Image: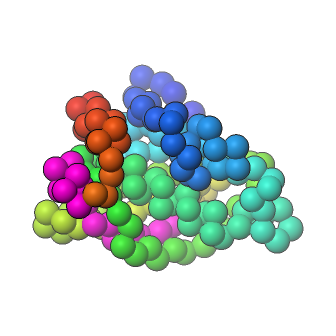
Amino acid sequence: MVLKNEDYTQLPNRGDHNCFGCSPVNTSGLRMTFYTDEAAVYSKLVVPHHLCGWNNLVHGGVLTTIMDEIMSWATIYLLKRIPMTKSISVDFLKPVYVGNPLKAEGTVLDKKGKHEALMEGRIYNKDDVCCARATGTFAVFSPAVAKRLSITDSESLKWFEKIFDLK
């Protein structure tokens, strides 16, 4: 489950926000970091014990959040668009336990015109077994449209544009 090698580039993250999924400063959150090989976006993480459901299993809502986050970051980096989740369908395939290393993967399934994308997210355990998968439909916006619709602020737009310029 090693991602930090010559085939992967770490994507920058902002330290001045409180996102439950990816903020490095949200002490209750997942603190996800992201990497890419230009075909997909990945994250390694360990779900903390305070996010368990029944009997040390990761709560299904937390697994869904991980896949929403990885699909969103895949949309940001791979499609160069600002995403908003429209819908998610999740399949829980195997138990996922708190405190164990996981890998999340996000990919593009289909770009539906200028304003919508179909994405896929997967969560793998330490043995690279797929434990959960999701498909998500995302509304996607250019920075100009996101600004006009007040979806994001000017500081965030500058940050998005840095990620868009990485390739």
Q: Which quadrant holds residue 121?
A: bottom left
Looking at the image, residue 150 sits to the left or right of residue 30; the answer is left
Looking at the image, residue 97 sits to the left or right of residue 18; the answer is right
Q: Residue at x 28, y 47 (%)?
A: 78
Judging depth in this view, the residue of 30 and 154 nearest the camera is: 154
| Percent coordinates x, y for residue 49 in the rendering | 80, 53
In this rendering, does residue 1 appear at all?
no
In the rendered image, residue 132 lying in the magenta stretch gets the answer yes
Q: Residue at x 31, y 58 (%)?
A: 151
Q: Residue furthest top?
A: 6
Judging depth in this view, the residue of 160 and 45 nearest the camera is: 160
| Percent coordinates x, y for residue 77 in the rendering | 31, 44
Q: Which quadrant holds residue 56?
A: bottom right
| Percent coordinates x, y for residue 137 in the rendering | 33, 71
In this rendering, does residue 129 appear at all?
yes
Q: Residue furthest left?
A: 113
- Of the 4 image quadrants, the one containing the N terminus is top right
In the rendered image, residue 41 lying in the magenta stretch gets the answer no
Q: Residue at x 56, y 46 (%)?
A: 18
**Is 45 placed above or below 95 here?**
above
Q: Which residues are magenta?
A: 131-149
- Of the 4 image quadrants, the one containing the C terminus is top left
**Is 62 placed above or below 147 here?**
below
Judging depth in this view, the residue of 138 and 4 nearest the camera is: 138
**Is 62 placed above or below 167 here?**
below
**Is 163 placed above or below 107 here?**
above
